[in-house]
Image (cartoon, grey):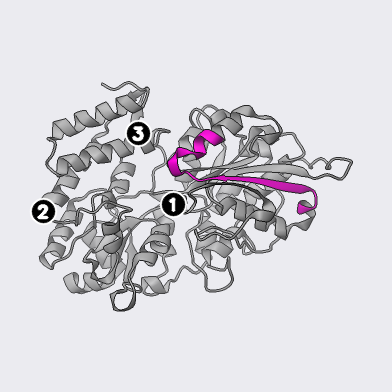
Amino acid sequence: MKKLLAMLLACVMVFGLCACSSSSAPAATQAPAAEAPKAEAPAAEAPAADGSKVTINVMSFTDEVPGMIAKYMEAHPDVAAKYDVNTTIIATTDGLYQPALDQALQAGGADAPDIYCAESAFVLKYCQGDAAEFAATYEDLGIDVAAATKAADIAQYTIDIGTRPSDGKLVGLGYQATGGAFIYRRSIAKDVWGSDDPAVVAEKIGAGSGSWDKFFEAAKELKAKGYAIVSGDGDIWHAVENSSPTGWIVDGALNIDPAREAFLDLSKTLMDNGYHHDSVDWQEGWFADMKKDGGVFGFYGPAWLINYTIAPNCGEGDNSSAGDWAVCAPNIGFFWGGTWVLAGKTCVGTEKQQVVADIIKWITLDCDENSLQYAWANGTLNGPGGTKDTVASGTVMAMSNGEMEFLGGQNMFDVFVPANQYANGKNLTQYDETINTAWREAVRAYTAGTMTRDEAISSFKTAVGDKLDIIVK
């Protein structure tokens, strides 16, 4: 989803709270007007004696979080009377966001970000890596982390990612659940196996096995009927990536875990046997395969892939695949995407601490029927009938209705809630975006026959060594 959002925000926008506009992205811009529980932070100091408002600085790469904060202020006029929100949105397009955020964090002072966002592609840098020192712990904000995460049933992978190793403290949490499932076409399942039941399809692809054996057996059966099991090798990459017990960097050196090296062979098997269409994700061929006549059985992904990618590209009229989809447990647990919300440590001990704590808790942890996440999960952010989404709180999803017409009436939460528990947040590094790009390019060269297996690995190592200051053996 974030890749699409970045495409929609191609320019830099700096504006105050009053200028926040509705987004064409899946932003939580219509949060319910509910009284948010107060975080356990010390009482906020009063605004300046001259009646001027205290400014809260917010920095993000989309208008999702700024939109949430805008609605928080609307729901809390007493807070809005005392605080102004100064919002800076810089798209990730052309790599502009991180340098701007880094500069703002390093400069500190009155203009330092009090609330800022990091997406999965670079979140480790801000929670665990080079820029982690600038984040306030949720505990220092006054939030009872242990009690709140337990009550909200926050998936462990999101906690792992948001925990700073140097002190073991939580500094960031997401508001969206991005655990992955296998998203498939019902009509194709019926044609090949006589049933579109998620339990049947889950068994066919080896759900929970941690193996690709059953998946390739299913691919062979699908091909015999004229179908591709996936559109391109990118459709299995996130499951492969997340299955690795170690990350790309170990002890300062490039590490190619066997689980990730196996992607060379998995991708080659897909190519050599014609089990996919050799599409590239986020390009036209990939989107075309989501239509009724696409001939592709399924895609690996979180709920956002259904709502914001497959649904808009599922075709029109007689060529629409809407309602012909379902989800089942994947053969390998994984997650894909997400945004983490952090607080700048400069706000701790100031008049901003209480309201920053309240806002972050409202976005990431509150889990009652009046909460932001409850409205989002049930599709009521913009009134009844809106898009339902998976949220960070398993508690919220357990008490919500995840039935979707697009999925033939299936309750997607039955699959996505447990999916979050199988995702792994301990094998990421702050350089994953760069290294993943180099790896996938090398794998595609190998499967296309322009490089041997050894040449592809060598090319990958050279690319990483040229781009990053790490040891490459």
Q: Could you say which is closer to the camera, residue 246 or residue 187?
A: 187
Disc 1 to disc 3, C-alpha distance: 28 Å
Residue at the (20%, 53%) spot, across then down = 278
Q: Which residue in the rendered view is the most extreme toward the bottom?
A: 318
Answer with the quarter of the image where residue 27 lies. Answer: bottom right
Q: Is residue 323 visible?
A: yes
Provide the residue designation for mark 2. 273
Kind of residue at badge 2: Asn
* For discs 2 and 3, the disc positioned in front in the rendered view: 2
Q: Position of residue 71 (x, y in %)?
A: 66, 58
Amino acid bearing label 1: Met
Quadrant of image for the N terminus:
bottom left
Which label belongs to residue 247?
3
The answer to whether residue 25 is magenta is no
How far across and down, in percent of the image, does residue 45 sit? 81, 40
Per the image, the residue denoted by label 1 is 7
Give the magenta part as a residue range: 80-100
Residue 73 as seen in the image, left or right of residue 224: right
Give the mark nearest the N terminus, 1 or 3: 1
Which of the 4 quarters of the picture holds residue 103? top right
